[in-house]
Image (tube, rainbow, N blue to C red):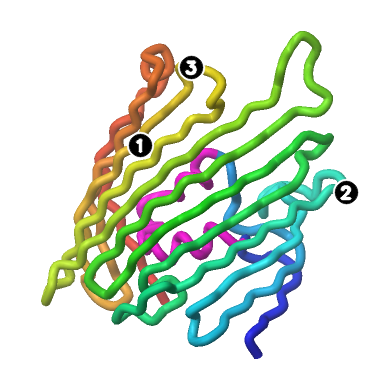
C-alpha cells in the first residue's frame, strides 16, 4: 500500500523528514525545534504516503500540539501536513534524495486559545556526495485573550540553510549551517543568527564523530551579554544500531 496509518506517539511531519535530510541530528536540533516552533513527535493519529518510489511523499497528522513531553492540554488539536516532490533524480534514491521542493503547514491553537500556525517552504538537493538545502518559515503565535494594554500578535520568521560535503573515497565530511530567527517581525532587536561549522569522520557504519563550532549572535547586545555560552566548540559522537 502507498499509505501507512499511525496512532499514538508518532513523528510529526516536518522535523523527522528534515533531520533525515540534514543527517546531523547529533549536532543539535533543527531551527524550528531549537526555537520552540515545532516538536519532533506528539500524540495523535496520522497517515504517511509515498508514490512512484518516493518521487512524491508526504504526511498528515492530527495531534495534541503540546509535544511528546507535555500533557494533552485542552481539547484543541493541531493539524500538520507535509508534501515533498522530487523534481530531478540523483544517486540518492531515499525519501529525501534528489532535487526536491517541499512544503509544510501546521495550524492549531495554544492551550487556552490563540493561534499556533507555521508555514514553510524548502528547496533541497541531496546526492551521495553532497547536500544543499534552504528553507523559509513564517510563524504566528497569539495569546487569547490578549493582556490588557498589549497587542500580542507576533508574526515570526525563520530562515535556515545547510550543506554537507562528503570528501570522495574517505569517511570525512564537512558540514555548515546558518539559522536566522526573528520571533517578531514587527519588533526590533530580537533577531538572532546561529552559525554552525564542523568536520565529521565515519569511523564505522555504526560510529560517527563530529568536531564543530556553534556560534550565536544577537541583534541586541543586551541579550548577547546574558548568554555566556553563545559560542561553543563541541566534540560529539553518534552510535547507531
The residue closer to the viewer here, 37 or 209, is: 37
Bin the neighbour count of mark 2 within 10 Å (Cα to Cα): few under 14, some 14-19, many 20 and up.
few
Bin the neighbour count of mark 1 within 10 Å (Cα to Cα): few under 14, some 14-19, many 20 and up.
some
Query: Could you say which disc has been placed on residue 75 in the image?
Result: 2
Which range is magenta? 13-35
Question: With 141 as the anchor, is 77 left or right in this view?
Answer: right
Q: CA distance from mark 1 to mark 2?
A: 36 Å
Q: CA distance from mark 1 to mark 3?
A: 18 Å
Give the residue furthest to the bottom: 1
Q: Which residue is mark 3?
A: 188
Residue 66 drawn above or below residue 187: below
Question: With 68 as the anchor, is 110 left or right in this view?
Answer: right
Q: Position of residue 87 (x, y in %)?
A: 41, 73
Looking at the image, do the residues carrying marks 3 and 2 touch, with CB atoms under 8 Å apart?
Answer: no
- Residue 134: say if magenta: no
Looking at the image, do the residues carrying marks 1 and 2 touch, with CB atoms under 8 Å apart?
Answer: no
Amino acid at each position: 500500500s502507498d499509505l501507512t496509518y499511525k496512532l499514538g506517539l508518532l513523528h510529526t511531519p516536518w522535523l523527522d523528514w528534515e533531520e533525515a535530510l540534514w543527517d546531523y541530528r547529533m549536532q543539535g536540533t533543527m531551527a524550528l525545534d531549537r526555537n520552540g516552533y515545532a516538536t519532533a513527535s506528539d500524540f495523535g493519529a496520522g497517515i504517511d504516503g509515498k508514490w512512484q518510489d518516493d518521487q512524491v511523499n508526504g504526511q498528515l497528522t492530527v495531534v495534541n500540539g503540546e509535544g511528546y513531553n507535555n500533557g494533552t492540554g485542552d481539547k484543541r488539536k493541531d493539524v500538520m501536513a507535509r508534501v515533498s516532490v522530487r523534481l530531478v533524480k540523483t544517486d540518492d534514491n531515499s525519501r529525501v534524495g534528489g532535487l526536491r521542493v517541499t512544503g509544510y503547514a501546521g495550524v492549531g491553537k495554544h492551550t487556552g486559545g490563540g493561534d499556533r500556525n507555521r508555514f514553510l517552504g524548502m528547496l533541497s538537493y541531496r546526492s551521495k556526495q553532497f547536500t544543499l538545502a534552504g528553507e523559509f518559515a513564517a510563524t504566528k503565535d497569539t495569546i487569547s485573550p490578549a493582556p490588557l494594554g498589549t497587542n500580542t500578535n507576533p508574526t515570526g520568521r525563520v530562515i535556515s540553510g545547510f550543506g554537507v560535503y562528503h570528501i570522495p573515497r574517505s569517511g570525512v565530511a564537512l558540514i555548515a549551517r546558518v539559522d536566522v530567527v526573528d520571533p517578531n517581525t514587527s519588533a526590533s532587536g530580537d533577531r538572532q543568527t546561529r552559525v554552525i561549522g564542523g568536520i565529521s569522520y565515519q569511523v564505522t557504519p555504526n560510529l560517527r564523530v563530529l568536531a564543530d563550532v556553534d556560534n550565536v549572535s544577537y541583534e541586541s547586545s543586551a541579550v548577547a551579554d546574558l548568554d555566556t555560552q553563545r559560542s561553543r566548540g563541541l566534540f560529539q559522537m553518534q552510535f547507531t544500531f
